[in-house]
Image: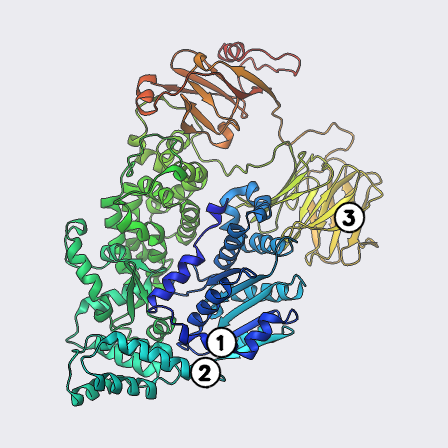
């Protein structure tokens, strides 16, 4: 759980930032420790928020690093912090911030883990990554902060202005925390941006430290910083050192970053230089960041400058996270041939990158970063288009990524051999065969979409742009899925394939369009299996994909040779299977746009699903069973309904009570007592403030006011037709037609008619080397996982028929036949101990689509062998 929560370790980020900026100098931050606003925030319980603000390069981040170091020396404070960086997509959004803060809190205090597990146990890692991750994480954090065991906690967020996605919801959450009276203190920093200022100044008892208003302290700190940096330059004589110090102090204008950039350039000046020449060199560094950036840009654009620096800078501007030097070498032609054969030459180029790129970039731990966010901002806004055209850079990255992945990726690239090898058990590979293409594997689709010409989207001329993508999918798609799983990025793979599928246009060639659609469906269907065990891309995914699947046909050669006969499956993809309930599904409701679905079950839960991805968004635990469903209509099915904005779900219970739940928080909003127990349908008004309830006995329509919880007068006319059981409801806000209402006097039937029973059965392991794991998810051989079973193929019964063949009775009422070659399988899956195991056997209750179908009642269980014989006969 904690491993899935971690997207980054803020402790490591802090160390990296400090190293990148040349180390943390105590004299550069010591002044804040005696600042009156800081002391008030630290010591006054009624002052929960401190906001440190200043212009770019003023040292805000290093100031917070110093505060963290000083406060961590005391055992009193429980710190959780996060450092935003807009240039890194891993740490530039509100969801990443919450994941980092929660990760630090729980790692320090493991007793807080149950607050995460209540949501994680339902859906796993998706709760931290899907479209509703913010909702789930903000609730988890709120619950943690209310935990009475949490003492003297301080949340620290650096660079709010670099929160590229979700800043406003983050500011709203900060305000909620401040108003919650939990005793939590917050320390934040940002640039002087108006929207942040307006929001934070709304908070009561806020302390603020403006670096511009504290210029005297900042100037003194910069003077100490300058002396330190000039000493590092190691000029041969004291006069030169003094002259450089004086020039920097005079022109720094209270900006640490300006000093750092100038000193970085001075490293390339000879240690012994005549005074006149020194003054000429210093004059090339004008005061002010923008003027300095302009001078740096002129050097890069000079016709005599090496073009490699411009190429590197263009790629650095276009990528979604900082690149390692190996990743950069795979995207920019360094003329090195095979990188692994020229490591020394690559290291030499890496050391030259800051100079080649005009000091806009720095190299830290073999990773290339922008020297500061303001440097990237300058290039984004003022770099010449002819040199740094965005779409050209995206196309360059894509054009390099696809062939590199095609050459690198292959089946079982890590040599795991065992088809059920869990991704979490894979040791670190050294050297890592994926090292150079890690970035490309995760982001190539983003760069493809960003490279498409806007004026040609949807035109036939767009088809050539898709040709390299089509070739890649045909040759490498399955190997790419394996690589994504090894990089633990299958959930993102689902999202970016959906993005690609949504952008395909009807004007595209049929082959490309169909291939993208099939590839998207393939990863959606088998994401769970491949995410858990990467080699299941070649086993479960190929075995259980339809024969008509284009991906299945293209990679059929990669099926394991120990599968002799595969299962006979449907010819086409199913729409989708949503798995999660532990008992009968009693009713479902679909949102008006069809993008959300609510399901109720006899297990007393309500589950909210994203129909596009199939991801479980939320589970609501109710306190009584729901009423079963017996009919379907366009706007709702059974006794459940979603509001038009899907923020509310209404569920009827067997007692007739109607419960209204908040789908975001899982809290019950209303418990409405209906006089009529036999309700037939529910319907929200467009604004979500009213709920219509159709009742059978008596036959009536009730309207509930959801602002007050009272019943309103019914403003409608009702016309019924006994022949078709149709009703027309004419309301003051809309007209809806209800079709196919059932005859209430006829027996009601369930939506799903399969009946099965569970029985625990002890089986000697020596009867068969094959078994089904607890939960019916994996088929194992000699206790090693070999085949992941998709939800609809998980067994209701399992038996050996002869030495090689295996029958699995499944919920869809037909036996699944797979034939394995035991010798081949055993060659890949080593034998372990010969011991007795206890596994869960599910007996199928009805095979109603087979010849001579037979029902099995609870009191007439038969052996699995007898059951299979009956089916075969």
Q: Which residue is mark 3?
A: 671
- How much space separates mark 2 and mark 1, taking CA atoms? 8 Å
Closest to the observer, 275 or 825 = 275
User: Judging from the image, what secondary structure is the residue with disc 1 in?
Assistant: helix
Tell which circle, 3 or 1, labels the residue nearer the N-terminal end: 1
- Give how far across and how far down residue 278 sits, in percent: 19, 86
Residues 268 and 230: in front is 230
- Give the secondary structure at mark 3: strand
Position of residue 827 relative to residue 165, above or below, is above
Q: Are marks 3 and 1 in contact (CB under 8 Å)?
A: no
The front one of 366 and 224 is 224
Nearer to the camera, 366 or 123? 366
Is label 2 in contact with label 1 (beta carbons under 8 Å)?
yes
On the rendered structure, is 131 left or right of 627? left
Where does the image place residue 725, in percent across and percent down from the top left? 73, 38
Work out whether mark 2 precedes mark 1 in sequence or the reverse, and give the earlier one.
1
Tell me the crowding category of disc 2: few under 14, some 14 to 19, or many 20 or more residues within 10 angstroms, Cα based: some
Mark 1, residue position: 32
Instruction: Evaluate if marks 2 and 3 touch, with contact meaning CB atoms under 8 Å apart.
Output: no
Q: Which residue is mark 2?
A: 217
């Amino acid at each position: 759980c904690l491993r899935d929560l971690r997207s980054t370790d803020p402790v490591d980020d802090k160390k990296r930032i400090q190293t990148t900026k040349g180390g943390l100098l105590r004299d550069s931050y010591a002044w804040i420790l005696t600042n009156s606003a800081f002391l008030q925030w630290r010591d006054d319980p009624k002052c929960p928020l401190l906001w440190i603000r200043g212009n770019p390069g003023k040292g805000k981040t290093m100031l917070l690093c110093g505060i963290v170091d000083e406060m961590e020396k005391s055992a009193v404070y429980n710190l959780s912090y996060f450092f935003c960086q807009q240039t890194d997509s891993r740490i530039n959004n509100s969801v990443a911030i919450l994941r980092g803060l929660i990760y630090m809190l729980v790692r320090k205090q493991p007793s807080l883990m149950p607050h995460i597990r209540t949501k994680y146990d339902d859906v796993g890692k998706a709760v931290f990554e899907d479209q509703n991750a913010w909702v789930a994480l903000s609730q988890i954090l709120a619950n943690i902060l209310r935990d009475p065991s949490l003492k003297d906690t301080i949340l620290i967020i650096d660079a709010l202005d670099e929160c590229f996605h979700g800043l406003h919801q983050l500011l709203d959450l900060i305000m909620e925390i401040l108003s919650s009276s939990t005793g939590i203190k917050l320390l934040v920093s940002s640039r002087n941006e108006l929207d942040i200022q307006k929001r934070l100044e709304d908070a009561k008892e806020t302390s603020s430290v403006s670096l511009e208003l504290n210029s005297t302290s900042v100037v003194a700190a910069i003077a100490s910083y300058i002396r330190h940096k000039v000493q590092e330059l190691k000029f041969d004589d004291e006069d030169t050192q003094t002259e450089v110090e004086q020039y920097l102090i005079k022109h720094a204008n209270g900006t640490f970053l300006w000093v750092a950039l100038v000193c970085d350039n001075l490293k390339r000046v000879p240690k012994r230089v005549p005074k006149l020449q020194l003054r000429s060199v210093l004059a090339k560094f004008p005061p002010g960041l923008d003027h300095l950036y302009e001078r740096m840009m002129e050097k890069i654009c000079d016709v005599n400058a090496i073009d490699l620096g411009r190429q590197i800078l263009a790629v650095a501007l276009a990528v979604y996270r900082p690149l390692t030097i190996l990743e950069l070498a795979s995207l920019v032609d360094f003329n090195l041939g095979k990188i692994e054969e020229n490591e020394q030459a690559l290291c030499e180029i890496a050391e030259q990158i800051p100079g080649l790129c005009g000091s806009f970039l720095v190299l830290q731990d073999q990773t290339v970063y922008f020297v500061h966010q303001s440097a990237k901002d300058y290039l984004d806004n003022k770099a010449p288009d002819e040199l740094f055209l965005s779409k050209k850079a995206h196309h360059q990255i894509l054009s390099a990524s696809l062939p590199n992945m095609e050459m690198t990726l292959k089946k079982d690239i890590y040599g795991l051999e065992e088809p059920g090898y869990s991704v979490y058990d894979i040791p670190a590979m050294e050297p890592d065969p994926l090292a150079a293409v890690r970035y490309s594997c995760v982001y190539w689709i983003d760069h493809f979409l960003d490279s498409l010409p806007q004026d040609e989207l949807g035109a036939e001329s767009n088809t050539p742009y898709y040709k390299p993508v089509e070739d890649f999918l045909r040759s490498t798609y399955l190997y790419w899925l394996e690589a994504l799983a090894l990089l633990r990025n299958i959930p993102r793979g689902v999202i970016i394939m959906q993005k690609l599928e949504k952008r395909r246009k009807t004007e595209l060639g049929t082959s490309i369009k169909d291939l993208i659609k099939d590839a998207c469906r393939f990863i959606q269907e088998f994401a769970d299996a491949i995410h858990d065990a990467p080699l299941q891309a070649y086993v479960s995914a190929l075995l259980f994909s339809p024969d008509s699947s284009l991906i299945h046909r293209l990679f059929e050669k990669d099926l394991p040779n120990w599968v002799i006969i595969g299962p006979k499956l449907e010819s086409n993809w199913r729409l989708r299977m949503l798995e999660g309930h532990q008992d009968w599904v009693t009713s479902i409701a679909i949102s008006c746009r069809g993008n959300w679905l609510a399901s109720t079950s006899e297990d007393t839960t309500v589950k909210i699903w994203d129909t596009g991805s199939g991801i479980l968004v939320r589970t609501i635990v109710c306190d009584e069973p729901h009423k079963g469903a017996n009919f379907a209509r366009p706007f709702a099915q059974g006794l459940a309904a979603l509001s038009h904005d899907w923020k509310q779900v209404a569920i009827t219970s067997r007692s007739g009570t109607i419960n209204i739940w908040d789908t975001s928080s899982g809290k019950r909003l209303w418990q409405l007592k209906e006089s009529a127990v036999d309700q037939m349908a529910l319907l929200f008004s467009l604004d979500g403030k009213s709920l219509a309830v159709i009742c059978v006995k008596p036959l009536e329509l009730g309207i509930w006011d959801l602002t007050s919880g009272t019943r309103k007068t019914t403003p409608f006319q009702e016309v019924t037709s006994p022949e078709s059981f149709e009703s027309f409801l004419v309301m003051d806000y809309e007209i809806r037609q209800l079709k196919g209402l059932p005859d209430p006097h006829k027996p009601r039937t369930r939506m799903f008619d399969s009946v099965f029973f569970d029985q625990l059965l002890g089986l000697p392991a020596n009867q068969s080397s094959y078994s089904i794991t607890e939960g019916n998810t994996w088929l194992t051989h000699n206790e090693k996982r070999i085949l992941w079973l998709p939800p609809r193929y998980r067994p209701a019964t399992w038996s050996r028929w002869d030495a090689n063949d295996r029958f699995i009775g499944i919920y869809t009422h037909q036996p699944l036949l797979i034939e394995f070659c035991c010798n081949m399988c055993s060659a890949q899956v080593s034998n372990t101990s010969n011991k007795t195991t206890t596994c869960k056997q599910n007996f199928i209750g009805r095979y109603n689509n087979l010849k001579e179908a037979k029902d099995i009642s609870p009191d007439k269980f038969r052996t699995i062998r007898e059951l299979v014989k009956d089916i075969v006969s």
